[in-house]
Image (cartoon, rainbow, N blue to C red):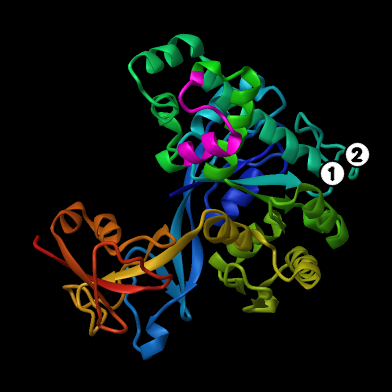
Amino acid sequence: MEVGVVGKPNVGKSTLFNALTLSDVPMAPYPFTTIKPNRGVGAVRVPCPHLERKTPCTPGNSRCVDGTRFVPVNLIDVPGLVPGAHEGKGLGHQFLDELRQADGFLQVVDASGGTNAEGVVAAAGTTDPKEEVEWLEEELVAWVADILSRDFARHTKSVELVGGSAEEFLRSRLTGLAIPPSQLTAAVRTTGLDPAHPSHWSSQDRVNLSRSLLRAAKPRLVAANKCDRSTPEAVARLAEAIEPIPVVPTCAEAELTLRRASRAGLVSYRPGDGSFTERDPEKLSLGQRRALEEIRGILARYGSTGVQQALEATVFSRLGQMVVFPVEDETTWTDSKGRVLPDAFIVPTGTSAKAVAYRVHSDLGEGFIRAVDGRTHRALGAEHPLENGAIVRIVSKH
């Protein structure tokens, strides 16, 4: 899965991306620092099942820190969006095209209201963060509606002449957006459109359909960044104003500082925690000590920097994902090499046992016989939905 980190220029997108991935993407206080998409890997936290048996795990595709498993998530940081992006303004076309395959969006806004619509730094409180959320939705809706509307009359009439469905038209037209067929059907129904006669859909119908599709298939969460220059009360007002889109207060700069200091051995800090400790205060410069004290103030006010929490809320709450642990021995929870709980995979909530088999390897899915629950040792059928944190062995012909 992939999460798109989006927003207008100079609100801290690249800083948040760097914090989550520990990449070195350029950051600067002027618009369009990012001129091409950056891809990286972040991670979400889940309890590692090895704690249940007090047996150390041997993680392969993820890492485990004191019983917390950090499971990888693909991220893409795209060029900043400005009003009119769907018409090509700024780096709009590039921005939008790179978001086609994203499963959902983590939108970064300037909670302090100190960045104007073009991404130019202004005085705090001169802009309304709510407007950033609103016009991003309008840009995305206009983008999808434009894709639907290209040569609309000819294509829809062709579908109707051969007895095709509106869903077939949408699937062929929006194939690059990776929207499941079930959500296409649901959007047509909830929008109240006639599925038998898509050629009758007006331009406003197509806008309404695009909005419904985006809300269902590409959910958003808002990271109210630069919260250190704002207040919890202001963030709460923003959350109320844009409900039901969730809001998480974040300070990407503080999170990036802590992660880099941890990597350098200056502090002990686990991503997402509400505190940190200096490893050797005597080795810190005066400037470093002052910076860390400022970060302590942010943690005291908000409980954390919010960066890790924003990603996890996007993956688990907005995108409805969960984590499963496939093994080859349901008794010892090991693979063929004797590694304990080597893999952790992010899959949609309620994913079936057979679907997990395909996620591990296509051969396992094609030869699927049954699955075995690692905790209860109960046999599971192909369509049995797995639970979050499930430990499962796949029995296959291959």
Where is 58 relative to 261, above or below? below
Q: Amino acid at mark 2?
A: Thr
Residue 143 shown in magenta: no
Image x and y of residue 14, in percent: 62, 44
Dot 1: element: loop
Residue flagged by tag 1: what amino acid is it?
Gly
Q: Position of residue 293 (x, y in %)?
A: 78, 70
- Residue 4 visible? The answer is no
Q: Is residue 11 above or below residue 150?
A: below
| Secondary element at tag 2 | loop
| Other residues around mark 1 within 10 Å, as few (<14) / some (14–19) / many (≥20) | many
Q: Give the quarter of the image for residue 48.
A: bottom left
Q: Quadrant of residue 365?
A: bottom left
Residue drawn at x 25%, y 83% is: 377
Can the viewer see residue 48 in this picture?
yes
The spot of residue 382 in percent (x, y) is 24, 63
Residue 384 shown left or right of residue 92 in the figure: left
The residues colored magenta run 183-198
Pointer 2: what residue? 126
Which residue lies at the image location 56% right of the left edge and 23% below the top edge? 93
320 or 44: nearer the viewer: 320
Front position in the image: 122 or 288: 122
Could you tell me if the residues under marks 2 and 1 are in contact, i.e. CB atoms within 8 Å?
A: yes
On the image, numbered disc 1 is attached to which residue? Answer: 113
Residue extending furthest bottom? 54
